[in-house]
Amino acid sequence: MSSTRDGFDPIGIIVDWLDACREERLAALVDLYDDKAIVDCCQGGTFRGRLGVEKYWRSKLTHPANSAFEVDALFPETDGVCLDYRAYNGRPVRTRFTFTKAGKICHTACSPIKQAA
């Protein structure tokens, strides 16, 4: 996803996303999402639209773990961005982000990362 072609910087949006999460700024986080966004969460379940995004993130930002939102890897993909990081509870997860042409997050899909024993 090229910032020149699409007129926005997808990696920059994810950096803003991480900052909003770390600073527990729910309104700023929700503003990064499209009105029809879909969040597929790690525990199963899907949240739709801005109200769904807000519902999903409200409890996650209330009391995050000390290691929450630390980045392990961040890289562009053909159709979006992949982020490996520590979730609100400190567990390692991978989230794939896709965007609208206007640069809003339209879909996130989270999956846990299994650590070696």
Image (cartoon, grey):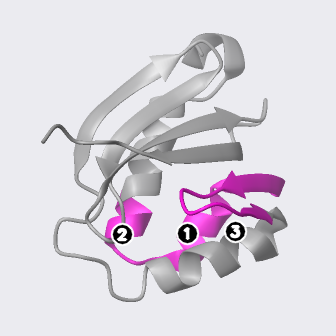
User: What residue is rendered at 69% in x and 56% in y?
Assistant: 39
Other-residue count near label 2 (Cα within 10 Å), few / some / many at <14 / 14–19 / ≥20: many
**Magenta residue check for 5:** no
What SS does tag 1 mark? helix
For residue 1, what is the image quadrant? top right
Q: Pointer 1: what residue?
A: 28
Q: Earlier in the sequence, mark 1 or mark 3?
A: 1
Q: Which residue: 54% across, 48% down?
A: 110
Residue 26 shown in magenta:
yes
SS at badge 2: loop
Q: Residue 41 falls in which quadrant of the image?
A: bottom right
Of the two numbered discs 1 and 2 on the same chain, state the one appearing first in sequence. Answer: 1
Q: Amino acid at mark 3?
A: Val
Q: Is residue 2 above or below residue 107?
A: above
Residue to which mark 2 is pinned: 88
Q: Which residue is mark 3?
A: 53
Residue 98 location, quadrant: top right
Q: Is residue 48 left or right of residue 8?
A: right
Question: Over which residues does the magenta segment extend?
Answer: 19-47
Mark 1 closeness class: few <14, some 14–19, many ≥20 residues within 10 Å: some
Determine the residue positioned at 24% across, 76% down. Answer: 65
